[in-house]
Image (cartoon, grey):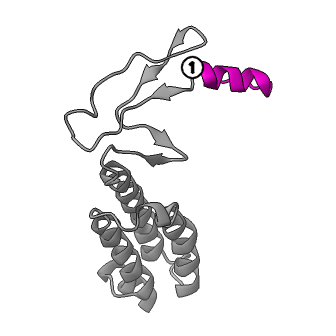
């Protein structure tokens, strides 16, 4: 940390100790909860077991389980919005549903997908994207009745 502090001073950077956290990544789950005392410029950094970086929740085993659960929850909420849109008379056209699905669901689902796409927990997101496809294709009971009018 002394080297990092020196580097920051050399390049006239000022790291924010209130935003900087420490975390342990280890292949054994029992070791990842161990809290280290890490200091930067005399201030102790907060410890977080599952830090978030660029909206991706990191886990010691890099399984992305927590991140994908959050993403699936977000998609479920957005699918509920699409279902309400599909059930209304003003927004039930196929083009409107497709555009809304791309903007609401697919943008959220595909964010950082190259990072977590090989995770064993991607099925949570897949289930929600399948629901999205059923809504915009009209094969969902709610969407098909709305699209027929």
Category of crowding for the residue at label 1, using alpha-carbon neighbours closer than 10 angstroms: few (below 14), some (14–19), many (at least 20): few
Q: Quadrant of the C terminus?
A: bottom left
Q: Which residues are magenta?
A: 1-18
Q: Is residue 109 above or below residue 26?
A: below
Name the image quarter holding residue 142.
Answer: bottom left
Is residue 129 toward the left or the right of residue 44 in the image? left
Give yes or no for residue 14 being in the magenta stretch. Answer: yes
Q: Is residue 24 above or below residue 27?
A: above
Where is residue 49 shown, x and y percent of the image?
Answer: 34, 32
- Residue closest to the far bottom: 148
What residue do we see at 37% from left, 37% from top?
50
Query: Is residue 16 visible to us here?
Result: no
Query: Who's the residue at 33% across and 72% down the image?
Result: 126
Residue 8, above or below 134: above
Image position, residue 60 (x, y; %): 32, 43
- Residue sitting at the far left: 30
Q: In this view, which residue lies farthest toward the top?
A: 42
Relative height, residue 17 to residue 64 (above, below): above
* Residue 15 horizontal/vertical position (percent): 66, 24
The answer to whether residue 116 of the structure is visible from this angle is yes
Number of callouts: 1
Q: Is residue 30 left or right of residue 95?
A: left
**Outermost residue toward the front?**
3
Q: Position of residue 46 (x, y in %)?
A: 45, 20
Q: Residue at x 24, y 32 (%)?
A: 31
Q: Which residue is mark 1?
A: 18
Q: Quadrant of the N terminus?
A: top right
Q: Nearer the viewer, residue 32 or 55?
A: 32
**Which element carries disc 1, helix, strand or loop?**
loop
Q: Is residue 17 magenta?
A: yes
> Residue 62 versus residue 70: which sits nearer the camera?
62
């Amino acid at each position: 940390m002394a080297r990092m502090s020196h580097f920051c001073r050399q390049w006239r950077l000022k790291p924010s100790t209130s935003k900087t956290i420490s975390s342990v990544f280890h292949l054994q789950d029992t070791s990842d909860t161990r809290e280290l005392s890490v200091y930067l410029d005399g201030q102790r950094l907060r410890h977080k077991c599952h830090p978030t970086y660029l909206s991706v929740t990191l886990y010691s085993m890099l399984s992305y389980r927590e991140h994908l659960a959050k993403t699936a929850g977000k998609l479920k909420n957005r699918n509920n919005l699409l279902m309400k849109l599909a059930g209304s008379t003003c927004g039930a056209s196929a083009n409107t549903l497709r555009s809304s699905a791309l903007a609401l669901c697919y943008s959220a689902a595909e964010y950082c997908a190259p990072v977590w796409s090989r995770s064993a927990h991607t099925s949570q997101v897949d289930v929600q994207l399948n629901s999205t496809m059923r809504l915009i294709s009209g094969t969902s009971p709610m969407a098909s009745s709305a699209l027929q009018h």
